[in-house]
Image (cartoon, rainbow, N blue to C red):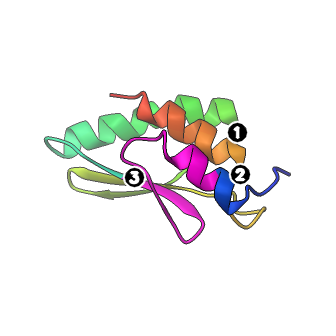
Amino acid sequence: MAQLLTEAEIQERAKVLSGWSVEDSKLQITRTFKDFIQAIEFVNKLVKPAESAGHHPDIEISYNKVKITLTTHDAGGLTQPDFDVARAISQIN
């Protein structure tokens, strides 16, 4: 199991993730697209990096908005894999 990060480690890592916020021991971002089709295309692009990392985001879709939440459920908070997947997601257009 991945080890929980300290609050200082979380804040340090969050500084370099543009658009992401930390709320209630979760890393979150909402991306807005032109329409539903583009939103779903983006979600489909998340599959490969999430599967490769073995670490899967919680995803909410509302028409053209996609909210992504990362946390390590079995550890009870944020761990390094959350930030690794967030960086990979940030690279997806």
Q: Residue 49: image x %, image y %?
A: 56, 30
Residue 27 within the segment the image draws in magenta: yes
The secondary structure type at the circle numbered 1 is loop
The secondary structure type at the circle numbered 2 is loop
Per the image, the residue denoted by label 3 is 29
Q: Using the rendered view, name the quadrant where residue 67 is placed.
A: bottom left
Instruction: Look at the image and tell me in which quarter the C terminus lies.
Output: top left
Q: Using the rendered view, name the quadrant where residue 54 is placed.
A: top right
Q: Amino acid at mark 1?
A: Gly
Q: Residue at x 23, y 37 (%)?
A: 38
Per the image, the residue denoted by label 1 is 54
Do tag 3 and tag 2 residues touch (Cβ < 8 Å)? Answer: no
How far is mark 1 from mark 3, CA to CA?
20 Å
Q: Amino acid at mark 2?
A: Thr
Do tag 1 and tag 3 residues touch (Cβ < 8 Å)? Answer: no
Q: Residue 13: image x %, image y %?
A: 58, 44
Q: Earlier in the sequence, mark 2 or mark 1?
A: 1
Q: Residue 36: image x %, image y %?
A: 20, 46
